[in-house]
């Protein structure tokens, strides 16, 4: 593999790599703001300047103060190159840590802070801000400008999701490039000139495409903030778990950021995966953490409508056992879910097999709008995983279940997950059953139609896998503990199975994953703090 | 109120579009045609240009605000640019500006109260050998003296100088 | 002064109505283009331009013949000629004379150049303020088209050449070749990353040669008399050939544009062409040789070139203003020839105030893309304002040097060098004046504050007392 020398060590590179990209691949940090591995090169921040020590040297004329003469005399310094722009090549000897480079970095840092407001105490970016980070590592001096900063508009509403602060902005144009290159929507641009430059939204428009939160994600400073996250949490109190988005069949990898003190999920961020979502998530995916906090089934529920009562989860389970025992085992319908984990679906499928029932159905959210960027039209994270758990492609939908109920082919329902494409009215036959048991973390049409609802943990409170549209099994880890009394889905199902006399004999989540690939994927997923 | 070009200016735009391999390259010349008619690039003008050239309004606004000579706010009937870069300053540019501000009753960046003149400071206008000078709309007035400047202002209809 | 000098480049300046094709043609226009297009091979034309050692007249002084050789087009590429008439460098006003007085020379040069480099289209980018010059050029182009010199069959040759003017709209940075290309394409005038260079990927992604108005205007003379002959007109032949336009402004009796061979001295330019100092009792203090981006020279500084192999050895011990004005000589002198338009300052000028004037210009004109220039140019102006207004500190001189030093070489384009080098040059040449100003502000009589204001009424001096920002906000905003 070809390689070049960076600070004395050999760094391999691929054809077309720049110095910075090759370093990034190797996990070596050359400080930068405007470069992003998923975007075109802008080379405007000048933080990544390095000294190419090999090859022809270009000298820049400068002045040096001569103590003896007590005046300034001509001197030279080497010309530095932006690592994000300079192509990697054999025989290249690069320094990113020499004195001349450090001087350049320190000056860029001072310049970026020159007209930057000291907003840290009220700025959401604090704690994950490159200006703070690089000041600490590459500057550590007070800026020498003595007068007011150049004042610009603050707290500008760019759209329903994003707020812009022009004073905090360093004009790196990552946000403009994200909209142009990821989304193909030229809704942002720069206006004015020089140190009056700002980012703005196309007049007559808002920042309103499906990836607006990616502008905040790439913003290295607090210029772009998420309205949803503004003033909510200090990032240094947050920990992260590896998650997989439950929004669609893409299976975007994400960081689930939670506050371990309150055990609340506060936000999601994309997790890089070059094979799935590269560096990105859509806005719907980014907001999908709300399902962890809102509209939760927190207790057991028995009865319907006015008569519905809250009971302990264990009581709901007992009620379910009683009702199901009154139905012949082979007439129980099992509804797997394209929104549930492979493990939850596997538990249900095994119970069905143990009870000798062949009536398997698949509930799924209806299609939504996909695109060529990330979003799958399949609004379900785990259709493939549900089929995997069943051992065969599930042909029968909830609509088919309704027909079978009407025909008397089945007389009871056990479902995991509450989402389905139908309206409640269409589920009348299910809503008429005594034994209609739904395991759910959030309310939905199936839990509305159920006679018993057993609460289960959400994806943020569980370990599990989703199999995406590529057939890739991806594991997510638990971020927070479930609310009191609420179990992981497969465990609640295993308890039901046990109580029905069909114990699954499963101790750990991993045992439910049917495919070796899924096991490996789960084993490879790491928790990150 | 939507913007529309006169028939003659519309013809100019059509001719301009034939000069370039794409419509975007005609943006600055087309903005000039519009500003010559309308005096400034109002939101209606901006939207018209964006639509005519199939460009985002962000693109048009980004260009308009980059270039000093395009106005995104209304200006007076006439725009007076006074050059204040070094060669002109060495030959009295500051005095020219002060005199203009007195005559027009506004500071640079502002418009005279009768709305007739917007006064702008300009950077080097490539008339250094004929300093000091001003540009009024398209015309350069060079080798200025204060008396000569007064006559020029009279001829373009500036209010007379107030008695001291 | 050059005795009995016959103007070549400006030979038609004194001819009334030479901007009209009929008059220009009667005085020699288009004869060379016809000969070049109909009887010369492109390679032969390029060879003459190389022999001429025509150094780019826009400021960088890069040899035009070598630049033309950078073209390496692929099958199916369109090649463009783009002519830089953005002339916005403070002190510079020579291209304007060519546009106004002899546009047909430029058109003729463009025709020959297009044929030589394989281009079928040329755009002449002219700064937006020169509305009359654009109109004159457009009329001249119409005449040339009507005569069949520009268009589908120039001089009957089956080689279409179309030439258009293209206006700027007020942005000095558009004189930078890649910013000019962006502006031509209808974009913000922000310079591009190089490589790729315009000869490889320029206008509309195609191979492009960008040359200054005066450079292209010199081409007909070069072809007419032969490159070597033209080159040898210069006092600095063979490396810096021919004749050129010199500008002179500031404190001289006869500011203006003058033609002379390459290599006259600043002393000749000031005394012989410029008529000497404006005021007999105010001697020359400093002269900026070629537009504001070139470091200032002092008549009382002597050339230090003792070593025999030093390029300026011939002028060792002589005044800086006695060195022949050439691209290479002035680089060796620690400055640059730039646009070859001198700004003359007499003893009444305070260099700190002059520096403030120029740094305000650079702050106003910075495109803002990259950090060192966007913030550095503003900070230089800000610091000089503080110093000039008496709020300076002793460390401000070192601060100015530090800011400028660290802008050098660290930016996307050479604008930063154009800002930093004159700043460094002024401090190096007039250090004590800066020290004094940092300690006590400008001397009496220099205290002015045109760069700050607050509100529409009142004495501008009050605005400073209010503590208003000394980041000049007034230059370009229209307050409705």
Image (cartoon, coloured by chain):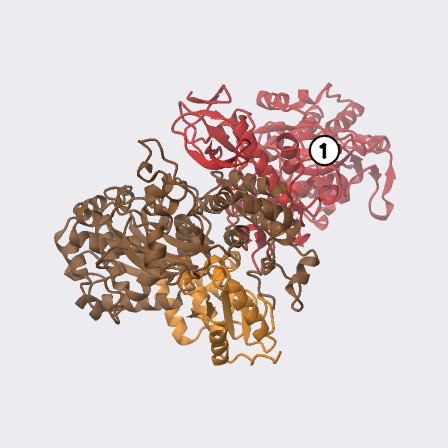
Chain colours: A red, B orange, C brown
Q: Secondary structure at mark 1?
A: helix
Q: Is residue C57 left or right of residue C458?
A: left
Q: Residue furthest front?
A: C281
> What percent of the width, then of the height, locates residue A20?
50, 31
Q: Quadrant of the C terminus of chain B?
A: bottom right
C370 w.r.t. C123: above or below: above
C166 w.r.t. C204: above or below: below
Between residues B121 and A228, which one lies in front from this camera angle?
A: B121
* Chain at tag 1: A
Residue C89 seen in render: no
> What percent of the width, then of the height, locates residue C232?
20, 47
In which image quadrant can residue A519 be found?
A: top right
C197 w.r.t. A185: above or below: above
Q: Quadrant of the N terminus of chain B?
A: bottom right
- Going 61% across and 80% down the picture, which residue do you hit? B163
Q: Is residue C152 left or right of residue B76?
A: left
> What percent of the width, then of the height, locates residue C369?
51, 47
Residue A353 seen in render: yes
In which image quadrant can residue A449 be found?
A: top right
Q: Is residue B2 left or right of residue A526?
A: left
> What percent of the width, then of the height, locates residue A85?
46, 36
In which image quadrant can residue A219 be found?
A: top right
- Going 56% across and 28% down the picture, which residue do you hit? A29
User: Mark 1 — residue?
Assistant: A460
Mark 1 Cα within 10 Å, few/some/many (few <14, many 20+)? many
Q: Residue furthest left?
A: C39
Number of marks present in the image shown = 1
Between residues A264 and A515, which one lies in front from this camera angle?
A: A264
Between residues A421 and B149, which one lies in front from this camera angle?
A: B149
- Going 25% across and 71% down the picture, which residue do you hit? C16
């Amino acid at each position: 593999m070809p390689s070049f020398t960076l600070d004395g060590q050999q760094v391999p590179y691929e054809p077309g790599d720049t110095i910075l990209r090759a370093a990034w691949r190797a996990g070596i940090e050359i400080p930068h703001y405007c470069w992003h591995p998923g975007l075109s090169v802008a080379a405007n921040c000048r933080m990544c300047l390095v000294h190419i020590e090999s090859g022809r040297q270009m000298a820049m004329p400068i002045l040096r103060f001569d103590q003896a003469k007590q005046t300034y005399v001509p001197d030279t310094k080497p010309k530095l190159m932006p690592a994000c722009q300079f192509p990697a090549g054999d025989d290249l000897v690069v320094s990113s840590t020499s004195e001349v480079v450090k001087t350049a970095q320190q000056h860029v840092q001072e310049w970026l802070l020159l007209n930057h407001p000291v907003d840290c105490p009220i700025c959401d970016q604090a704690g994950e801000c490159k200006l703070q980070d690089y000041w600490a590592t590459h500057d550590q001096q007070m800026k020498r400008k003595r007068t007011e900063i150049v004042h610009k508009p603050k707290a500008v509403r760019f759209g329903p999701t994003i707020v812009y602060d022009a004073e905090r902005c360093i004009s790196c144009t990552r946000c403009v490039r994200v909209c142009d290159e990821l989304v193909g929507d030229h809704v942002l641009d720069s206006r004015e000139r020089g140190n009056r430059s700002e980012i703005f939204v196309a007049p007559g428009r808002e920042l309103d495409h499906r990836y607006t939160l990616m502008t905040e994600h790439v913003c290295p400073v607090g210029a772009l903030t998420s309205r949803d996250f503004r003033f909510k949490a200090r990032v240094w109190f947050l920990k992260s778990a590896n998650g997989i988005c439950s929004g669609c069949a893409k299976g975007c990898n994400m960081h689930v950021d939670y506050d371990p003190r309150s055990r609340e999920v506060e936000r999601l961020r994309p997790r890089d995966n070059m094979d799935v979502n590269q560096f990105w998530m859509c806005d719907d995916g980014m907001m999908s953490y709300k399902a962890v906090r809102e509209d939760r089934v927190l207790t057991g529920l028995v009865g319907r409508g006015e008569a519905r009562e809250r009971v302990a989860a264990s009581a709901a389970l007992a009620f379910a056992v009683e009702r199901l025992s009154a139905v012949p085992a082979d007439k129980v319908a099992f509804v797997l879910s394209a929104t549930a984990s492979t493990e939850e679906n596997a538990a249900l499928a095994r119970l069905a097999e143990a009870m000798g029932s062949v009536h398997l159905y698949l509930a799924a959210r209806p299609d939504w709008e996909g695109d060529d960027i990330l979003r799958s039209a399949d609004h379900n994270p785990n259709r493939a995983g549900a089929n995997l758990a069943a051992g065969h492609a599930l042909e029968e939908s909830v609509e088919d279940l309704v027909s079978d109920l009407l025909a008397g082919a089945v007389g009871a329902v056990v479902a995991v997950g509450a989402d389905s494409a139908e309206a409640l009215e269409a589920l009348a036959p299910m809503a008429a059953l005594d034994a209609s048991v739904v395991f759910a973390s959030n309310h939905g049409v199936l839990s509305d139609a159920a006679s018993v609802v057993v609460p289960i943990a959400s994806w943020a409170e569980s370990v599990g896998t989703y199999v995406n549209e590529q057939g890739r099994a991806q594991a997510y880890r638990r971020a927070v503990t479930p609310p009191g009394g609420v179990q992981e889905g497969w465990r609640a199902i295993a308890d039901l199975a046990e109580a029905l006399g069909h114990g699954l004999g499963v101790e750990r989540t991993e045992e439910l994953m049917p495919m070796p690939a899924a096991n490996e994927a789960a084993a490879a997923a790491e928790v990150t703090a | 109120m939507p913007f529309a070009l006169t028939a003659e200016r519309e013809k100019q735009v059509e001719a301009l579009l034939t000069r370039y391999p794409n419509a975007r390259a005609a943006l600055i010349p087309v903005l000039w045609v519009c500003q010559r008619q309308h005096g400034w690039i109002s939101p209606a003008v901006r939207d018209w240009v964006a639509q005519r050239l199939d460009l985002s309004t962000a693109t048009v606004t980004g260009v308009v605000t980059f270039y000093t000579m395009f106005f995104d706010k209304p200006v007076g009937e006439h725009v007076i640019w006074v050059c204040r870069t070094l060669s002109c300053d060495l030959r009295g540019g500051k005095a020219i500006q002060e005199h203009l501000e007195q005559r027009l009753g506004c500071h640079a960046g502002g418009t005279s109260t009768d709305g007739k003149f917007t006064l702008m400071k300009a950077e080097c206008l490539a008339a250094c050998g004929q300093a000091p000078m001003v540009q009024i709309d398209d015309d350069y007035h060079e080798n200025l003296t204060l008396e000569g400047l007064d006559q020029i202002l009279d001829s373009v209809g500036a209010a007379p100088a107030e008695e001291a | 002064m050059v005795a009995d000098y016959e103007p070549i480049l400006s030979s038609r300046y004194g001819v009334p109505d030479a901007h009209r094709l009929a008059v220009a043609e009667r005085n020699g226009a288009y004869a060379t283009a016809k000969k070049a297009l109909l009887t010369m091979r492109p390679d032969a034309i390029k060879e003459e331009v190389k022999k001429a050692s025509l150094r780019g007249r826009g400021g960088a002084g890069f040899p035009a013949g070598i630049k033309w050789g950078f073209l390496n087009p692929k099958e199916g590429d369109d090649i463009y000629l783009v002519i830089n008439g953005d002339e916005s460098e403070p002190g510079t006003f020579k291209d304007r004379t060519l546009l106004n007085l002899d546009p047909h020379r430029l058109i003729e040069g463009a025709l020959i150049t297009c044929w030589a480099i394989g281009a079928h289209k040329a755009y002449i980018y002219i700064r937006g303020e020169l509305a009359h010059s654009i109109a004159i050029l457009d009329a001249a182009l119409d005449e040339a088209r009507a005569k069949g010199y520009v268009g589908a069959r120039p001089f009957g040759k089956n080689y279409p050449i179309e030439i258009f003017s293209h206006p700027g709209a007020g942005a000095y940075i558009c004189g930078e070749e890649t910013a000019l290309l962006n502006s031509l394409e209808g974009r913000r005038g922000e310079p591009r990353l190089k490589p790729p260079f315009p000869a490889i990927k320029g206008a509309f992604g195609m191979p492009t040669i960008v040359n200054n108005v005066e450079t292209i205007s010199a081409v007909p003379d070069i072809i007419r008399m032969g490159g070597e002959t033209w080159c040898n007109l210069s006092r600095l032949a063979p490396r810096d050939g021919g004749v050129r336009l010199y500008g002179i402004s500031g404190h001289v009796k006869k500011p203006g544009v003058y033609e002379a061979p390459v290599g006259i001295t600043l002393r000749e330019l000031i005394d012989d062409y410029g008529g000497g100092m404006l005021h007999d009792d105010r001697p020359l203090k400093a002269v900026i040789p070629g537009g504001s981006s070139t470091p200032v020279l002092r008549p009382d500084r002597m050339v230090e070139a003792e070593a025999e192999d030093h390029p300026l050895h011939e002028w060792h011990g002589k005044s800086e203003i006695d060195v022949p004005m050439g691209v290479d000589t002035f680089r060796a002198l620690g400055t640059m020839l730039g646009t070859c338009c001198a700004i003359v300052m007499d003893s009444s000028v305070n260099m700190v105030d002059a520096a403030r004037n120029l740094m305000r210009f650079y702050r106003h004109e910075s495109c803002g893309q990259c950090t060192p220039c966007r913030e550095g140019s503003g900070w230089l102006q800000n610091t000089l304002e503080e110093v000039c207004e008496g709020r300076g500190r002793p460390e401000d001189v070192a601060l100015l040097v530090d800011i400028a030093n660290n802008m050098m070489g660290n930016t996307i384009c050479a604008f930063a060098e154009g800002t930093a080098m004159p700043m460094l040059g002024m401090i190096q040449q007039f250090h004590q004046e800066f020290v004094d100003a940092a300690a006590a502000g400008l001397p009496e009589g220099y205290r002015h504050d045109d760069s700050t204001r607050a509100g529409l009424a009142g004495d501008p001096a009050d605005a400073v007392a209010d503590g208003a920002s000394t980041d000049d906000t007034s230059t370009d905003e229209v307050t409705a």
